[in-house]
Amino acid sequence: MMFQGDTTEDATAVIPRELSNIVLAAFNNLSPILWDALKIASCIGYSFDADVYEALTGKLGFIPKVEELATSYDAFERSDSNRYKWKHQAVYEAVKSLLLKNQCVQIHSMIIDVFDQSAEQQSEGSENWTQGLKADAHRLLARHCSLAEKWDGAFQQYMNAGRRAEETYNFNEATKMYEEAIVCLGKITPQHSMRSRLLPTLRLGSCLRELARYNDSEAVLTQCLSETEAELAGGKGDEQMYVHALTALATLHQYQSKYNEARDLYERALPIARRVEESSSSLWLAGHIAGYAEILRKSGDLPSAERLHREALEMRKERSCTELEMAVSYTQLGCTLFGLKRYQEAYKQHRLALLSRFKYLDFSHGLVSESLNYCAEALCALGRSEDGIPLAMHGVEIRKQVFGSSHPALAHAFSILASNYHAVGRSCDAKQLLEKCLAICEEAFPKNHANIIPNLMNYGKVLRSMGNYRKGREVYERSIVIHQLNFKANQKVDQLEKCRLEAKELAQLEASAGDDGSCIPDIARGVMPIPCVNMDLGASPIIILTDVGRDVDDEYALILLGALSRMNLLTPLAVVTTLAPARERASLTRGSLDALGLAKVPVGVGGAGGLDTDIPLEVYGAQYARSCSCIFESGVALMVRALESAPENSVQLLCIASLQDAATLIREHEELFVTKVKEVLIMGGVKPLDSSEFLEPDTAYNNNCDMESAKFVYKRCQEMGVPTLTLTRYTAYGCPVSNVIFDDLVKTAHMVGINTRRVSMEAINRLWHKVNLAATDPRREKLPSRCDRQWFCRTFFGKENIDRDSSMSIWDLVTKLNMYDPLTMLCCVPEYRETYFYWESKCVNGVQHRVTGISEMNNGVIDSALLCKKLYSLFGLSLRNALQNIC
């Protein structure tokens, strides 16, 4: 919560008494209690958050008085975010002008006392107050302490505010708080001990380091070290603070790639730390041992680093420290084991850290993103990059929120995601991410910083795979130069030799490469291979046509695909998006599949779906949507490649969108279609089975998008003897799902689960608006005329009508939602098809064509409760598995 009044001037406003009397005339008859509330509000500031000052209501009833002043005297106005501000600036200034300085001090002191009492009460009961205020409460209290001239209290609160800001990785805010704490120290008499004097300065230096303000950090920390050394020389020093000063400066040198200087400082600090602490199990000592081990790891002495990290880990175990403290040791040991190429052991440590952090921290916390990134890195090294990509994607998004778009922490996340993409054959995506990574590093780090080397090496590897040998060689040659500037001859020898070997091989490839482009691999052109089909596993190959982005059930079908793929029930060969704008739908599909652990499944762009391209169709947004060159520009060409790679009579074609692209495939590649396609599954609808010689499509939305294509697909499949299975809207009506599903899937913390819940609310309100339009209104976007207001009320509320107009949100009244496309996806698995659905058949040319849900009374669902339970289970399985079951 932000307290916007804390930057206003608190000096008494200079307003003539006569003018004040005129401005405040409307308040002449106020009771003394309400006058007190006005005075308190003037001290708080021009605007303030009612929730923050709710703590005052217990003793003073402050907020109720403000509400009375707002409604009865027009003194304040209230915003939607529960903030109050003075209605008139002149009134605010006039009230302030009535207060003498000592009165202001008394009011601020009273506010402090009330807050302190509230904090004591809350510590004995509910935690709502402390959880709601967090770091802002400390900053707010520090301001009131300063204005009350209680400098000790202000110092402590600014230190608390700085610590809480650091915990949320808000280093800019933490820097400001520690600077304020230092100012307060200068006003305290008698002066505090050296420990109290230096602690905010050391924290300030560390925050400046995290902000990559290395010169400023070095100046601050060098001064701290000089002061501690002077105190020790005078015989009255604090050895613990001396160790802190040494290690803080050493950590800065590590960040600056000055490994020799960092190591020297730690080797001065560690013997003192061991001597100061009589017990070898001290957590304080463990922290410094681990810090020294990190210097050794970064400088290449991995065996020594492992030994020290294990020593620190055992110390922490002996002292039964918190799981979050243990997570630090797991992470540091995991990084060391990774450097030793013991990837399985590294993954085990990083997973332990991730589980602890997920348990105790918000999923959006920076430490959670750190563990996600390291787990993804280890999975990549273990050959499990498709599993690593969802973790890395979440790590990137968290770091964008926590650190912003230009921090080295985000660059590191980009690099790990790039490595995973490269490992699954998507070098174009990797190249794009590494270029973003390097741009951040070049800006954030000093020139020729050692931390750039791993990213350059990754970039060189990607360039080599794409056939760009000259640029790849130049990248490795630059890595060699930076290495030699930062490391001694015996440090990180493997890294240097790797760079030299790659540069030499790239020079040879460059010399032998032709200029006609014949040596450029498919990977450089963004052409993804079709996934291999292993029929021995029993996983049926499937091609999916979807209009994802229209509503969430298409994306829920993809979530379901993730589970069925992991269970070896389906092998997705390709996903093609149809319905304009198909390219945007492809980007959403690409990102969703990546986040679900299906990064190897190629995505193609289909046609407009039969709708007029001039009609603007919406594609809902998602932060994980990914536009990249690996998306096939021709969905039909992708389907052809997929069919050519598959065994005969093996492929299921799942159509959960317009049938236009399916019709094009049949028209242009009929023989291939008949040879390879085992059956076609359609989410749509058919006319009564006995109404014609053939099954004929009805006016279901997917059919209605391009009725000519729908008729063609149904008729040609029946003529060619390719079986069809149709799931109708009535089946979905027979298995409505509860809103609870959206809440439960959000608990997995998976980005797709979170986004689909958001979109669901928006989609249901959008549909509500459309069904209230006239049947001929083009904004209905070919929504069947039967889908009117009455249909909506029956479908989603079980009522004939409700008292609410089309401009209002309807989400709170919805009692059931339909999962059209996931149910059709489920029917791709024969076991589920027969377990959960009744089928009607029509035999044409000796082939059975099956339909479930032939009417509202005969919806085809055997047991709605069991079917819902299965869907819930598979949705949760997919999202949890994608995040390696951390929840």
Image: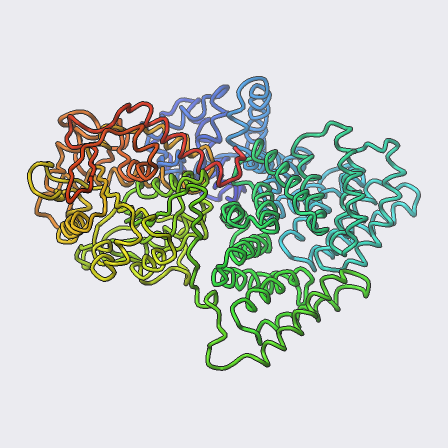
Q: Is residue 286 visible?
A: yes
Q: Quadrant of residue 513?
A: bottom right
Q: Quadrant of residue 187?
A: top right
In the image, 135: left or right of 486? left
In the image, 266: left or right of 556? right
Q: Position of residue 272 (x, y in %)?
A: 88, 42
Q: Residue furthest left?
A: 691
Which residue appears at 66% of the width and 33% of the height? 153
Q: Position of residue 100 (x, y in %)?
A: 54, 35
Which residue appears at 76% of the width and 46% of the height? 291
Q: Position of residue 849 (x, y in %)?
A: 19, 40
Which residue appears at 58% of the width and 47% of the height? 379
Q: Is residue 100 visible?
A: no
In the image, 806: left or right of 118? left
| Along the viewing direction, whichever of 66 and 157 lies nearer the viewer | 157
Q: Residue furthest front?
A: 846
Task: Count up the numbered dots.
Answer: 0
* Type of colouring: rainbow
Which residue appears at 47% of the width and 63% of the height? 428
Q: Position of residue 537 (x, y in %)?
A: 45, 42
Q: Quadrant of residue 140?
A: top right
| Along the viewing direction, whichever of 772 and 126 lies nearer the viewer | 772
